[in-house]
Each structure stands twice: as structure tokens, then as C-alpha cells.
């Protein structure tokens, strides 16, 4: 194999691929990427046996077809530090030589032909979604997935397909994010209405570069999802298990409804939490006549208080929340204003932005 790569294009590909190849694994070959040079393009694959990426690079001149399997982190480091516009990769007998204008590296790899099969995208799509729409949905719900949990179902994002809409739901048991995304068209043929996509696969899709016009094509195969956009194919096993019945915890009967500035509230929450600590746990939101007060305190540090004027004539109420969970949601609200709904102090808070995003946050007891 011999190919002349545009270094920037190769670096972009490896930036995505190295986030899949595990740095620690009992199978050394999984720490590698598979580079297969074909007549007009080069395919680079990475997998951890749960999630895989099949990345095609066309900004390349192939002089000799072939395949090489080499450590992903070593290759990425060389490409990242290179100052050349073009890098030459030449491989034979399980080793790869990388040449720049003033550099020459030799990397020893694995035996060709031994790398696990990473799916490409074949046939017609069953679902099509605009890339920018899907990435906006990912950004507004992925943060709420459980990072470590024995309940594997909440480590992923629920996809609920209804007509031309995709509802994406994520929860870690203490908060829940719900986002509606418009499909490009209604699903073609019979597709499952509910499936749980791993958070890692969603995070990879959020990193895919593209234009406003790019579309994500989706196929569902047995217990696997395959998503293709431009020159990238992401495949992943689906998460097994039952996702919580999230509809049951979304409040629908609240009488305290406020419209707040997103930027001003984010600033108030950040400032109110500056003196809070692990022991004091959170901040308090107090609704009083014509104002809302954000406050935080720690016995050995002091207390903070931020007031905002608003039109409120209802009963006073005080509710405690985890400030970071509030910040996470406010960061991803793109509108200038959002709605905050509150019930009793022991019931969840509800944030809404338009008709397509809502966020449920469990209260905490500040003592």
C-alpha cells in the first residue's frame, strides 16, 4: 500500500477515529486503526466492538492499493505534530512508513486481514434526518445521560419515532431532557418505535463535520444501528433493557409559570453557586412578590444572593436544586427566553424552550 494524504484531512479523520479505538483493551488489535487503500479513496476503520467508524478519505492520491493495521494513538500523534501539507504512507509486511519533507517514521502494526469487520452503509435508508437538526437534538439531551450506572438503559438516549418526528430522551435518574427533532421524511417501511442508542455513538455523531444541507441516513439491523453522513459511517450496538416511563415524571399541573431570560438566569445561577460546596449541595430558588432570588451558602464560606425583578403575584415558594444541573440545561437553550414551572418544594422543576425542548430537574433538600 502507498498513498499520499492531505495531512489536514487525515488529521480530521483520526480525531474522530481515536475517540473510538480504546487505549486499554485485552485485544491489542482494537487499539489500532485499519487503513485500506482502494483505487480512488482510502477507508480508515476503528472499533471497540460496541461502536465502530468507517471513514472514507477522498483527499488522497493512491499509488498502490493495500491494507495496514497500526496503533491509532501513534499515527494520530505523528499526523498531529507534522507541519507538512502532504504525508506519504507506505505499508508492507505489517509495518507502515510515514514520510514528510524532513521526517521519516516507521510504525509496526498487526497482521493485515485480522481486523474486525466494521459495517459500511449498504442499501436504502429507513430514516433520514438533517445533520444540523440531529446534532442540535444531541446537544440538548446527551448531557443528561447516566455516565456510570448498572441500569444500562439510561446510559443511552431513547429514540421514540412517531410519524415525521423523532423524540430523543435522556435521564440519569435525577434529571431528564426531552427533545423533538423533525425527520426529513416519514420512516420507510416498518421500523421500531422505541430504541436506545448508546451515548458514545451519539457523541460521535455530534462531532461529525458537515454543512446545513447534509443528511444522516439511518438503517436498523437486528440489534444494531448504522448511521451514514457524507463520508462517515457510524455503527453501534443498541442498548438492551427498558427505558423508564419518562412521561410519568413530566409535570403537567403546575400553576407557577415564569418566563425568564436565559442569559441572565445562567449568570444568576453561576454567581449564586460560587460559595456553595459539596456539603451545602446546591442553591435555592425563592419566588417572592415581583422578584426571584437565587441564593447559595456554605457555613464555613459565606453566602451569595442574586435577585431578578419579574412580574410574579403568586404564593412565595423556595426550592433547592443542584446548580450544575441547572447550568447544563441553560447552556443548551438557544432561545433568548425560557419558561420555568414550579409546583411544591418537593416536586421537580420544569424548564421549557418552545415546543421542542423540555427539562425536568429533581429538587434537593437544603436542610
Image (tube, rainbow, N blue to C red):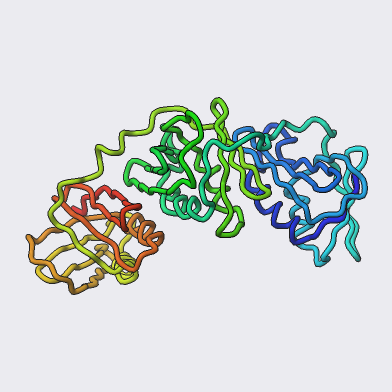
Residue 245 position (above or below residue 343): above
For the N terminus, the image quarter is top right
From the top left corner, tell me how far across and down residue 275 is, in percent.
31, 66
Q: Which residue is drawn at 88% across and 40% down?
A: 66
Q: Which of 195 and 322 is in front in this view?
A: 195
Q: Where is residue 39 in the image (x, y as percent from the top left)?
A: 86, 45
Q: Position of residue 243 (x, y in %)?
A: 38, 33
Q: Is residue 303 visible?
A: yes
Q: How many labels does the image show?
A: 0
Q: Quadrant of residue 167?
A: top left
Q: Relative to 161, is 128 on the left or the right? A: right
Which of 182/15 is in front? 182
Asked if 334 appears above or below 189 in the picture, the reply is below
Q: Where is residue 120 in the image (x, y as percent from the top left)?
A: 68, 37
Tell me what residue is drawn at x 92 percent, y 49 percent: 63
Question: Residue visible at 49% across and 50% down?
Answer: 134
Question: Can you see residue 274?
Answer: no
Task: From the viewer's side, name the closer residue of 267 and 255.
Answer: 255
Horizontal relation, residue 86 to residue 156: left or right? right
Q: In this view, does 332 lie to the left or right of 220?
A: left
Question: Splitting the image into 4 quarters, where does residue 83 fall?
Answer: bottom right
Residue most extreme to the top: 222
User: Between residues 61 and 110, which one lies in front from this camera angle?
Assistant: 61
Amino acid at each position: 500500500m502507498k498513498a499520499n494524504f492531505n495531512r489536514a484531512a487525515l488529521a480530521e479523520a483520526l480525531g474522530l477515529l481515536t475517540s473510538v479505538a480504546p487505549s486499554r483493551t485485552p485485544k491489542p488489535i482494537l487499539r489500532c486503526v485499519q487503513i485500506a487503500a482502494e483505487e480512488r479513496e482510502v477507508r480508515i476503520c476503528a472499533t471497540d466492538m460496541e461502536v465502530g467508524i468507517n471513514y472514507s478519505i477522498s483527499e488522497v492520491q493512491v499509488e498502490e492499493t493495500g491494507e495496514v493495521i497500526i496503533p491509532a494513538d501513534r499515527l494520530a500523534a505523528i499526523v498531529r505534530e507534522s507541519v507538512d501539507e502532504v504525508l506519504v504512507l507506505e505499508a508492507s509486511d505489517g509495518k507502515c512508513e510515514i514520510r514528510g519533507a524532513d521526517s521519516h517514521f516507521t510504525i509496526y502494526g498487526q497482521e493485515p486481514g485480522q481486523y474486525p469487520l466494521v459495517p459500511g452503509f449498504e442499501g436504502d435508508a429507513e430514516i433520514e434526518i438533517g445533520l444540523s437538526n440531529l446534532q442540535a437534538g444531541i446537544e440538548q439531551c446527551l448531557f443528561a445521560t447516566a455516565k456510570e450506572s448498572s441500569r444500562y438503559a439510561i446510559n443511552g438516549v431513547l429514540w421514540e419515532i412517531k410519524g415525521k418526528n423523532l423524540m430523543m430522551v435522556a435521564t440519569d435518574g435525577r434529571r431528564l431532557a426531552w427533545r423533538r427533532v423533525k425527520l426529513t421524511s416519514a420512516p420507510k417501511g416498518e421500523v421500531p418505535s422505541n430504541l436506545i442508542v448508546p451515548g458514545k455513538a451519539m457523541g460521535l455523531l455530534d462531532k461529525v463535520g458537515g454543512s446545513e444541507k447534509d443528511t444522516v441516513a439511518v438503517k436498523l439491523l437486528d440489534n444494531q444501528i448504522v448511521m451514514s453522513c457524507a463520508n462517515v459511517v457510524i455503527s453501534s450496538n443498541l442498548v438492551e433493557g427498558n427505558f423508564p416511563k419518562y412521561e410519568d415524571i413530566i409535570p403537567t399541573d403546575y400553576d407557577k409559570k415564569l418566563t425568564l431570560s436565559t442569559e441572565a438566569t445562567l449568570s444568576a445561577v453561576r454567581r449564586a453557586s460560587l460559595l456553595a460546596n459539596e456539603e451545602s449541595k446546591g442553591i435555592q430558588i425563592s419566588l417572592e412578590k415581583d422578584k426571584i432570588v437565587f441564593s447559595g451558602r456554605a457555613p464555613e464560606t459565606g453566602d451569595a444572593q442574586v435577585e431578578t425583578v419579574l412580574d410574579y403575584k403568586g404564593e412565595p415558594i423556595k426550592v433547592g436544586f443542584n446548580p450544575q444541573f441547572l447550568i447544563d440545561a441553560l447552556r443548551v437553550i438557544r432561545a433568548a427566553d425560557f419558561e420555568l414551572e414550579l409546583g411544591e418544594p418537593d416536586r421537580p422543576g420544569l424548564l421549557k424552550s418552545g415546543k421542542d425542548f423540555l427539562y425536568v430537574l429533581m429538587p434537593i433538600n437544603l436542610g
